[in-house]
Image (spheres, rainbow, N blue to C red):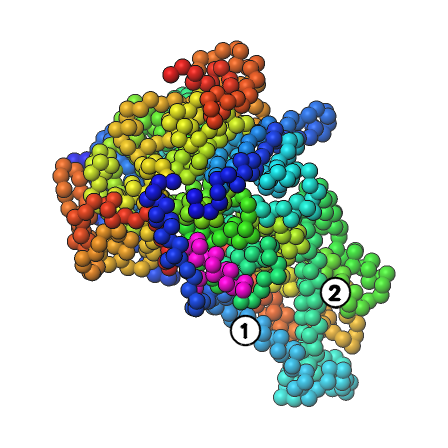
């Protein structure tokens, strides 16, 4: 590797220890009965290595967005602990959290809404740079802005322009530049290419890969598109109803998934190969992605599972277990592909 | 990583050096786009021109006129328009044109100042409520709802009775009523903006609440605020005229357009010019401000700015 | 004669900033029971084409020319009354965003019965029964109760099913599906596409499937039209388009998709951005982005479609040297984003 030696990279760069994010909906006004608890994130434990790209995959309601905001401490976890480079974040008081925030940066899905329409690119980047270096001014500041722009593949002559003067792909580059400006330790990319045209997507994906190589970034890449995640991520975590149901190397997850939900996700993705499409075996799920407000009991996947219904599904309590070396999955006996 | 990718990535490093001199292209801010759109709206431009002309007329006019607004000529009494008194004179012989101009000064002043007061209070209150959200927001807006329900007239009358009649009190009284709509609009604008990702980005960059509200939220709600402000001015001027009608407005010898219209209305059949001139200017101001406000609304419409 | 034939359709938008040629001389056809895909990115004109077929274009857009022959009848020339009979009756359309394509103030039953009443002689009771069975056929459980619900009580996937049921309830000859699954989760997308296929088989409806997703096209279409900058650049069977693409854009697009790449390599990229349709395009619209080495300057001539083989047409290209395969000329680096 060109940047750091393998041994000095932390394995436990970001550690989530039984993190949960439960939203209590309160009580009904007259009767006093509880309106229920939304378990958006439920007992997630995860370790992200330094310099790795972890893909986070799931459908709507799975909690991946809530998880990313919890990691960034925009909302505090209801329980569990979060460590960054060994330092526990979840126990820090509010004003200290604000200072820690610049270690996490986010790239959002919508390139139109992620930039302040009233600020020039220069202003937005300068503001972001100064969060880490408040004393940088004038010529030096300009220099840094130029460096950032070049790094993301934009021409510095555009720096005084406003967001609406750029295309979607270019705006996303500006958003990436802004995310890099405070020199963060972790970048969370929440569906960064989903809103872009296919021919632009590959430009941005290449850019992210290159930045990771150049700058030794650690990244969590959230997407519903498994083919994109497979390409860019080193490891993939699959989420369902606030829990991780499978975790492992990207290749393994895609080529040899254990959990039936992962297999369903894989088979649901249309492949641009007509003969393959016609011939492959599909696992088709029934029903809609569940709402975390009323999660099914037990295995929680059983309402949609193509496996024949068994009453015991409602009572098992699956946990994330290491099924094969480095390959974790929720050990629900009805959901795991144990036989070949 | 494979060899080929590494080679490509490595090769990039040497080529990618920022240029020493950069020609910076000027950006087109959304305000500039809005201004261009406004310029193309002929009605709005004419209204702007007319309004500016009226303001100049009222502010500069009295310095140019040979007549003083307090100079009475009881022998002459009310007389129609003539070469000496272009707008005629009122029942006390005072030159109507100068009185109209000075009346305009007061009406416009009330309009602008009261709107400014309403703006300041409304924007800050609404932005804070929208930003904080939750229970605080609910409480703040219920307070606004309650105030909305109170009858304005009684409130102002009470104020006037309690604190005596003065111009400044009227600014405050009217401003206190008008800020309510402003607060609501700003609050809903802020709530819509708050969900946008660039606000989340600002939060994740560790910006203080104050900075987010002032630099990121408020500039983006200014559009609707400007439109409402432009439409509030005529509303305020009408309110002031209404108060004057009730005798709660400015005191003689000062007169606003409302007072002049009231006087004119009393002698409408015999001395119609006493009503026509002030009413004409008042109506012209109201119309031009309304059309200008409409034009601003179209020009500042964020939807057209998005392509 | 095909069920629906489109010849030289053009739709322009007359904006203050200029004329946007959203659809420029587009031709294709669809047979009974066939599924034809229209693939393109944003600005390609695929959606505007569909709206033009049903004459749903309003000022500042205007259908400038061409023919849309539906069973021999030119839809661009018939009366508005006849169009109303056709829309929803003979040719139905479903849209991308299930959140906004149903009227939030009306119950589902009201909306479906309204459509039925317009296009058939059924009375209200019979229409309601038919609507309920239509919902059952698209997989909505407990349809008898749920039909009286409001759109917001349904999830995105279910709303799309309701849309499909509404569109097919009159048993139209053609169903136009404009990005029907783009806004849905991927497992729901698979369900909806299967559903469309299933209903199509039962009813024999022809389907025009508009999407930007090549994977969706590969699995669901018999023929594909690739659109770029308002024109059809290549047209053929699904096999031909995927295994023997001839136009540089078609080739480059397929190469840029991650699923076909080996892991670890950088992706092939298509440099630049889709063109500004407000500016007139000389010759080949893809010329500025084409990775093939250029051998001629763009001239003003509008490109022609040449027929290569049975059913396979491609836009003529005489500007580039096409001797090498696309992989040899496509770049994998991180290109500068030029203005």
- Residue B301: image x %, image y %? 51, 56
User: Is residue A233 found left or right of B280 in the rendered image?
Assistant: left
Q: Which residues are magenta?
A: A140-158
Query: Does residue C163 appear in this view?
Result: no
Element type where label 2 sits in the image: helix
Q: How many marks?
A: 2
In three-dimensional space, the C-alpha distance between marks 1 and 2, rounded to whole angstroms, equals: 26 Å
| Mark 2 neighbour class, 10 Å CA radius: few under 14, some 14 to 19, many 20 or more | many
Which residue is drawn at the image coordinates 57% and 29% (left, top)? A44
* Residue linked to disc 1: B49
Which residue is drawn at the image coordinates 50% and 63% (left, top)? A143
Where, quadrant-wise, is the C terminus of chain A in this rendering?
Answer: top left
Magenta residue check for C240: no
| Mark 1 neighbour class, 10 Å CA radius: few under 14, some 14 to 19, many 20 or more | some
Q: Is residue C282 above or below residue A319?
A: below
The quarter of the picture where residue C262 lies is top left
Q: What's the magenta bit mostly, secondary-structure-wise?
A: helix
Where, quadrant-wise, is the N terminus of chain A in this rendering?
Answer: top left
User: Is residue C195 found left or right of B171 in the rendered image?
Assistant: left
- Residue A152: image x %, image y %? 44, 53
Which residue is drawn at the image coordinates 47% and 61% (left, top)? A146
* Residue linked to disc 2: B171
- Residue A175: image x %, image y %? 49, 51
Q: Nearer the viewer, residue C45 or A49?
A: A49
Which residue is drawn at the image coordinates 18% and 49% (left, top)? C322
User: Is residue B192 found left or right of C290 in the rendered image?
Assistant: right
Query: Does residue A12 appear in this view?
Result: yes
């Amino acid at each position: 590797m060109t940047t750091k030696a393998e041994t000095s990279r932390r394995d436990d760069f970001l550690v989530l220890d039984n993190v949960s994010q439960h939203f209590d909906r309160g009580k009904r006004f007259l009767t006093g009965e509880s309106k229920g608890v939304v378990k958006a994130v439920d007992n997630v434990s995860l370790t992200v290595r330094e310099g790795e790209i972890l893909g986070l995959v799931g459908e709507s309601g799975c909690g991946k967005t809530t998880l990313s905001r919890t990691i960034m401490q925009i909302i505090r976890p209801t329980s569990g602990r979060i460590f960054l480079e060994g330092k526990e974040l979840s126990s820090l008081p509010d004003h200290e959290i604000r200072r820690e925030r610049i270690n996490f940066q986010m790239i959002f899905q919508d390139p139109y809404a992620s930039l302040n329409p009233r600020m020039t690119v220069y202003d937005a980047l300068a503001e972001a740079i100064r969060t880490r270096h408040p004393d940088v001014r004038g010529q030096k500041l300009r220099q840094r802005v130029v460096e950032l722009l070049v790094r993301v593949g934009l021409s510095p002559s555009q720096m005084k322009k406003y967001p609406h003067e750029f295309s979607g792909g270019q705006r996303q580059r500006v958003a990436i530049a802004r995310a890099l400006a405070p020199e963060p330790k972790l970048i969370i990319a929440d569906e960064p290419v989903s809103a872009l045209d296919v021919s632009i997507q590959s430009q941005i994906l290449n850019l992210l890969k290159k930045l990771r190589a150049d700058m030794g970034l650690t990244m969590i890449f959230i997407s519903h598109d498994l083919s994109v995640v497979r390409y860019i991520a080193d490891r993939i975590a699959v989420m369902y109803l606030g829990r991780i149901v499978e975790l492992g190397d990207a290749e393994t997850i895609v080529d040899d998934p254990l959990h039936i939900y992962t297999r369903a996700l894989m088979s649901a993705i249309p492949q641009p190969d007509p003969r393959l499409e016609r011939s492959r075996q599909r696992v088709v799920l029934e029903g809609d992605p569940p709402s975390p407000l009323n999660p099914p009991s037990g295995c929680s996947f059983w309402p949609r599972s193509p496996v024949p219904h068994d009453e015991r599904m409602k009572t098992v309590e699956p946990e994330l277990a290491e099924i094969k070396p480095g390959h974790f999955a929720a050990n629900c006996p009805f959901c795991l592909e144990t036989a070949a | 990583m494979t060899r080929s990718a590494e080679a490509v990535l490595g090769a990039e490093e040497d080529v990618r050096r920022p240029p020493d001199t950069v020609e910076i292209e000027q950006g087109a801010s959304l305000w500039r786009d809005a201004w261009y759109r406004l310029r193309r709206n002929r009605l709005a431009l004419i209204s702007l021109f007319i309004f500016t002309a009226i303001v100049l007329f009222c502010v500069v006019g009295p310095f140019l006129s040979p007549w003083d607004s307090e100079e009475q000529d009881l022998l002459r009494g009310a007389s129609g328009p003539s070469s000496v008194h272009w707008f005629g004179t009122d029942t006390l012989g005072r030159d109507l044109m100068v009185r109209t101009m000075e009346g305009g000064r007061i009406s416009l002043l009330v309009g602008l100042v009261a709107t400014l007061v309403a703006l300041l209070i409304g924007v800050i209150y609404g932005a804070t409520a929208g930003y904080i959200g939750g229970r605080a927001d609910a409480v703040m807006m219920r307070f606004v709802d309650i105030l909305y329900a109170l009858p304005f007239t009684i409130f102002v009358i009470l104020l006037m009775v309690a604190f005596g009649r003065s111009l400044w009190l009227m600014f405050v009284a009217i401003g206190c009523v008008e800020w309510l709509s402003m607060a609501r609009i700003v609050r809903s604008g802020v709530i819509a903006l708050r969900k946008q990702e660039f606000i989340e980005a600002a939060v994740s960059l560790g910006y203080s609440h104050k900075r987010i509200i002032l630099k990121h939220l408020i500039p983006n709600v200014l559009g609707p605020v400007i439109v409402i402000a432009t439409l509030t001015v005529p509303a305020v001027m009408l309110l002031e005229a209404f108060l004057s009608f009730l005798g709660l407005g400015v005191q003689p010898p000062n007169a606003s357009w409302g007072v002049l219209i009231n006087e004119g209305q009393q002698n409408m059949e015999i001395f119609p010019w006493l009503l026509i001139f002030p009413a004409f200017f008042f109506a012209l101001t109201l119309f031009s401000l309304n059309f200008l406000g409409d034009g601003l609304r179209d020009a500042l419409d964020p939807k057209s700015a998005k392509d | 004669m095909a069920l629906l034939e489109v010849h030289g359709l053009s739709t322009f938008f007359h904006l203050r900033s200029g004329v946007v040629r959203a659809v420029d001389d587009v031709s294709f056809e669809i047979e009974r029971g066939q599924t034809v895909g229209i693939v393109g990115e944003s600005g390609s004109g695929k959606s505007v084409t569909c709206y033009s077929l049903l004459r749903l274009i309003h000022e500042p857009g205007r259908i400038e020319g061409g023919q849309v022959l539906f069973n021999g009848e030119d839809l661009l020339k018939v009366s508005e009354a006849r169009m109303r009979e056709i829309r929803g009756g003979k040719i139905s359309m479903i849209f991308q965003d299930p959140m906004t394509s149903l009227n939030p103030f009306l119950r589902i039953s009201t909306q479906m019965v309204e459509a039925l009443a317009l296009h058939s002689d059924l009375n209200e009771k019979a229409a309601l029964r038919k609507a309920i069975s239509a919902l059952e056929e698209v997989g909505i459980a407990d349809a008898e109760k749920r039909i009286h619900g409001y759109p917001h009580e349904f999830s995105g996937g279910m709303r799309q099913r309701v849309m499909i049921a509404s569109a097919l309830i009159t048993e139209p000859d053609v169903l136009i599906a404009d990005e029907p699954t783009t806004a849905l989760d991927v497992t729901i997308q698979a369900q909806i596409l299967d559903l469309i296929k299933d209903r199509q088989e039962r009813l024999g409806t022809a389907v025009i499937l508009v999407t930007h997703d090549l994977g969706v096209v590969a699995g669901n279409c018999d023929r594909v039209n690739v659109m770029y900058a308002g024109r059809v650049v290549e047209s053929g069977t699904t096999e031909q388009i995927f295994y023997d693409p001839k136009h540089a854009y078609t080739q480059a697009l397929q190469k840029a998709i991650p699923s076909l790449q080996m892991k670890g390599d950088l992706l092939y990229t298509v440099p630049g951005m889709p063109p500004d349709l407000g500016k007139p395009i000389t010759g080949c619209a893809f010329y500025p982005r084409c990775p093939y080495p250029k051998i001629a300057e763009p001239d003003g001539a509008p490109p022609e479609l040449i027929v290569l083989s049975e059913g396979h047409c491609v836009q003529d290209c005489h500007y580039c040297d096409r001797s090498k395969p696309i992989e040899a000329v496509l770049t994998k680096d991180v290109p500068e984003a030029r203005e």
